[in-house]
């Protein structure tokens, strides 16, 4: 199975900061990479698919990039509602796997 | 508006069985592949099972293979997960999710709509 490793596992940031989360795949996955946001007690929400395509309705401060094994999720100007846990997921090959999550906390 | 509503969760003893259901509305259910994704308490996300729009392709995570059976009823806009021989490690919230990425022949599942989840607790 392809292992997805996110870094950091957690980070503290302030409103207005630029935040970047990295996701590394154990083998190449082209651009078959999605990002999700999950708030406590809620279902995850799709942010980005195909590595860099913003899901409809997602604010433009979110952006994604990368291909092969290395990917990033960037929040350009952190808002209060962005404090959450973020997961990457590869859908290149079975079994479809998620990263362990990155928790973004208030500094 | 897309809606996915799970039901069927609860407390069950190890070795027991449960059947989860998901009622879909607000979209053409028969056109989409679907999956179940679970989350153990305080843990990350784990894909569990996948079914294409015609039920001609069904896949399972190794952790549930030979114990769980996924099915769908396109006439009833419903999805099901029959869970047998349940173990403590199956405890968690189970989400029904829609997959816009896959075709009938090519699974490429990512998940654009999620239900609210149903909690399964396997404990004696």
Image (tube, coloured by chain):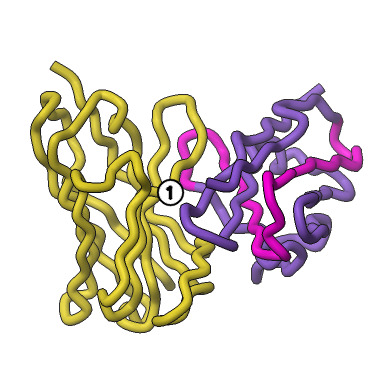
Chain colours: A purple, B yellow
- The residue to which callout 1 is attached is B47
Q: Nearer the viewer, residue B85 or A13?
A: B85
A54 lies left or right of B72: right
Displayed quadrant of residue B69: bottom left
In the image, B15 versus B13, the foreground residue is B15
Q: Is residue B50 above or below residue A70?
A: below
Element carrying mark 1: strand
Residue B117 percent coordinates (x, y): 34, 46
Q: Residue furthest top?
A: B124
Total tally of numbered discs in the picture: 1
Reply yes or no: does residue A11 show up in magenta: no
Q: Residue at x 83, y 49 (%)?
A: A74
Write down the chain letter for disc 1.
B
Query: What are the residue bounds of the magenta stretch?
Result: A14-43
Q: Is residue B88 visible?
A: yes
| Pick the front one: A82 or A29 | A29
Q: Measured from the top left, where is residue B3 in percent x and y?
A: 37, 65
Q: Give coordinates of residue B44: x percent, y percent.
A: 51, 34
Q: Is residue A102 left or right of residue A66?
A: left
Task: Report if residue A19 lies within the magenta region.
Answer: yes
Residue A78: image quadrant is top right
Can residue B116 be seen in this snapshot? no
Residue at x 73% of width, y 69% of height: A53
Badge 1 crowding class, 10 Å Cα cut-off, few under 14, some 14 to 19, many 20 or more, is many
Residue at image x 37%, y 48%? B61
Above or below residue B76? Residue B59 is above
């Amino acid at each position: 199975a392809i292992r997805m490793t996110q870094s950091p596992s957690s980070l503290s940031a302030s409103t207005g900061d630029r935040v970047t989360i990295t996701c590394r795949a154990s083998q190449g996955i082209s651009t078959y990479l999605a990002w999700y946001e999950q708030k406590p007690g809620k279902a995850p929400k799709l942010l980005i698919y195909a590595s860099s395509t913003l899901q409809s309705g997602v604010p433009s401060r979110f952006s994604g990039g990368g291909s092969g094994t290395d990917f990033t999720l960037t929040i350009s100007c952190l808002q209060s509602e962005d404090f959450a846990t973020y997961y990457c997921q590869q859908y290149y090959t079975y079994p479809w796997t998620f990263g362990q999550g990155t928790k973004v906390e208030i500094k | 508006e897309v809606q996915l509503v799970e039901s069927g969760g609860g407390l069950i003893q190890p070795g027991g069985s449960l059947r989860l259901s998901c009622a879909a509305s607000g979209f053409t259910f028969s056109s989409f592949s679907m999956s179940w994704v679970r989350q153990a308490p305080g843990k990350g996300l784990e894909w569990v099972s996948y079914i294409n729009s015609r039920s001609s392709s069904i896949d399972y995570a190794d952790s549930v293979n030979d114990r769980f059976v996924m099915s769908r009823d396109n006439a009833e806009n419903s999805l099901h997960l029959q869970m047998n021989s349940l173990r403590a490690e199956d405890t968690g919230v189970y989400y029904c999710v829609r997959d816009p990425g896959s075709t009938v022949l090519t699974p490429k599942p990512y998940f654009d709509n999620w239900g609210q989840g149903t909690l399964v607790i396997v404990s004696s």
